[in-house]
Amino acid sequence: MKSLKGDLLLQRLAENTSGKLYTRLYNVIRMTILDGSLSPATRLPPSRDLAQELDVSRNTVIKVYDQLLAEGYIVSRAGSGTYVAESVPDTLLNTITLAPLVSQTPAKSVLSVRGKHLLERASASARQWGPFMPGVPDVTAFPHKLFSRYLTRLNRDPTPSQLTYNSHPGGERTLQQALVEYLRVSRSVHCRPEQILITEGSHQALDLVTRMLCNPGDYAWVEEPGYWGIRNILQMNDVNICPIPVDESGMLPPDELLTAPPRLIFVTPSHQYPLGPVMSLPRRQQLLAIARKLGSWLIEDDYDSEFRFSGHPIHSLQGLETGTPVIYIGTFSKTLYPGLRLGYVVLPEALVPPLVTAHGELYRAGHLLTQRALAQFIDDGHYSAHIRRMRLLYAKRRSFLTALIEQHLGKDALHPFTSNAGLHLILRLPENIDDIALAEDANQQGVMVRPLSRYYLGSQKSCGLLMGFASLPEQEMAEAFSILMQCIHQHQPSIPVLNQDECNDTNS
């Protein structure tokens, strides 16, 4: 004769038909305990009896009992049997009790003020790949098979130190050494391996520098317009932001201070983001003098300097003079691919010990095998060769997009600060066009442009669209441009609609 407990479990087991028998039985008994059908201190059938009642293997029942015992749902009393525990683990998190409370409490109401502000200003797109997406390289052109061979060799027999926590302060030593030579030749950055801190991209580097060098209430200068990621990091760390306008020579410092001296000055001197000018030598020297006078740190974000399509490479701000108060930040997201999540910071000597220690404490650095593989990739010349190939490819695509814009919208449609570098162009729009609404319409059509006005902090804004060209072959670029022109026409009927054939005729 079956017990009442056995009948109940058999009924629920019949209702729960998905998954393996062990998992089903475990879930049935667990939920029967949690919903009170098996009250605390209730004696469970012996494993042999329950196996017979349910027509299952006794080993299955024993395995389920052992799991429930290990998790604290049941207790075993020697010579007496198995019982439901007096206080089960999920009691404090009973979903049945908490469900009404959770449903009545909006998630935003439990966030901090800083958290709410971050969400209000969030600018990261849900899609990071598509026609005209700014700042994205052609990830399909990376030699993945070649790089995977480096990874495969290292993964065959990794050392314990490559698999443990914080065994390499600052990052994989071989990558630090490889970067010293590469940065010296390509960017005129002067440093020792110990000064290079490997990070998971530029955002982590910016966050680390801000946390370690700024107190709440300090001031920081940022470019206006400028990269939204820097602003969000500063706001999350309670740093006051001073937007400093940008002209054709880069950041234009004020004649006199309107606030306390800035603790940090963020600049993108090699290719200002998003407008594109290259900072002139006099302006670089001026900013270095200001930083020294005010006791500020210059944060040089050198995010895509490798892609300059004419003239000589622009030397880094860090290497312009000896002993500069410059923290140089670079990334592999633009030269290789964003998903690699590797960047680096070149620190002044005095900041090396504290920031390396802080990085280990805050972020627990890892990916040492990937870092070593990348170091070998660089040392064997593949990194420089890849950049040379991509520079030629991007120059061709940039020329095609430039021709599309100039032919169909006129030369004045390109922003006057545009330099022959980077991975995007700025399409200027008439001031009566809402670039945010236009960008949203284009995004809905699969054209991933970004509105220029979103990059401004102040009330004086320019309208335009950021148009990335690096990841887009010419044929697809023509198709996407014709769609974009249709969207522009809907917002400004005086601008004609183009068909795809007209776009394809560009440069023909």
Image (cartoon, rainbow, N blue to C red):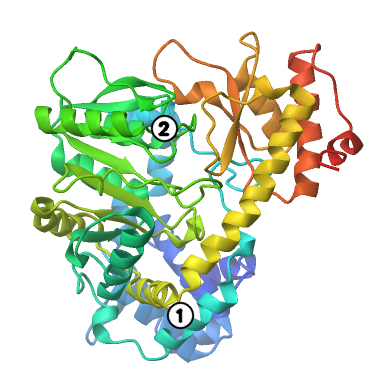
Question: Which residue was labeled with disc 2?
Answer: 228
Determine whether 30 is above or below 345 in the image.
Answer: below
Give the x, y percent position of residue 332.
43, 58
- State yes or no: discs 2 and 1 in contact (Cβ < 8 Å): no
Residue 50 visible (yes or no) = no
Determine whether 375 is above or below 348 in the image.
Answer: below
Regarding mark 1 in the picture, which secondary structure is present there? Answer: helix
Residue depicted at 55% across the width and 61% down the height:
388
Q: CA distance from mark 2 to mark 1?
A: 34 Å
Q: Is residue 300 or residue 395 the one in the foreground?
A: 395
Residue depicted at 58% across the width and 85% down the height:
55
Regarding mark 2 in the picture, which secondary structure is present there? Answer: helix
- What quarter of the picture does the C terminus occupy? top right
Query: How many labels were placed on the picture?
Result: 2
Q: Which mark is residue 180?
A: none
- What quarter of the picture does the N terminus occupy? bottom right
Answer few, some or many: residues within 10 Å of disc 2's Cα (few below 14, many 20 plus, some between 14 and 19): some
Q: Earlier in the sequence, mark 2 or mark 1?
A: 1
- State the image quarter where residue 115 is shown: top left
Q: Is residue 161 or residue 153 the one in the foreground?
A: 153
Tell me: 9 left or right of 98: right
Determine whether 184 is above or below 204 in the image.
Answer: below
Give the x, y percent position of residue 456.
44, 21
Question: Which residue was labeled with disc 1?
Answer: 151
